Amino acid sequence: MDSSSNGELCLCALDGVMEVLSRKWVLFTINSIGRRGVARFKDLYRELKGISPSTLTAVLRGLEAQGLVSRQQYAEIPPRVEYSLTKDGEALRRAILPLLIWASERDTRQNSRPRCEPGQYVRVV
């Protein structure tokens, strides 16, 4: 029986997803790919200031394993790999955008000067 019709949700569905989503760079990576539509590793690495290549690789693999990001590899020289959001990934991005905006607005209200350095800003839309 679906209990969401009476206002209840089963939080067990978050078990596998929260392990991935709670990692530091995941929400930013989802937003960045979603904003671009299709993104290459080097573009994500440049945009996400402060992330290491190994961390970005781990984040992308985790998102792919959860079915949130699809990876397309082309048989070219040099090799080309592109990442895009799946339908679930797009739905997740729509869900997290208000959280990203809220956090940014809250930080601005609470701090007299922004905590981010000029190169650390990420476009949301």
Image (spheres, rainbow, N blue to C red):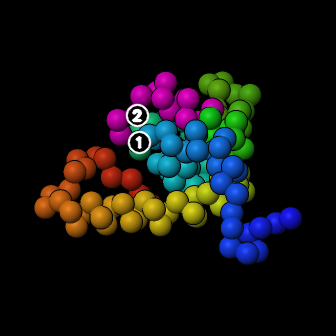
- Which element is circle 2 on? loop
The reply to whether callout 1 and callout 2 are in contact (CB within 8 Å) is yes
Outermost residue toward the bottom? Answer: 6
Kindly report the secondary structure that dominates the magenta region of the rendered protein. helix
Front residue of this view, candidates 17 and 123: 17
Outermost residue, left side = 112
Q: Is residue 55 magenta?
A: yes
Residue bearing mark 2: 51
Q: Mark 1 points at which residue?
A: 48
Residue 91, by quadrant, is bottom right
Q: Quadrant of residue 73?
A: top right
Identify the residue at horizontal 22%, vertical 51% (top origin): 115
Side of 113 where 28 appears, left or right: right
Taking the image as shown, residue 84 lies to the left or right of residue 23, namely: right
For residue 78: magenta? no
Which kind of residue does numbered mark 2 sit on?
Ile
Real-space Cα separation, disc 1 to disc 2, in angstroms: 6 Å
In the picture, the disc for residue 118 is none
Magenta segment range? 49-61
Residue type of the residue flagged with mark 1: Leu
Q: Residue drawn 82% across and 66% down?
A: 2
Quadrant of the rendering where the N terminus is positioned: bottom right
Q: Where is residue 99 in the image (x, y as percent from the top left)?
A: 45, 62
Q: Position of residue 30 (x, y in %)?
A: 55, 49
Q: Can residue 115 be seen in this view?
A: yes
Closer to us: 44 or 116 = 116
Q: Is residue 69 visible?
A: no
Seen at 47% across and 48% down, the residue is 28
- Relative image position of residue 87 (x, y in whole percent): 72, 56
Given residues 40 and 124, the one toward you in this image is 124
Q: Tell me what residue is drawn at x 51 percent, y 43 percent.
A: 22
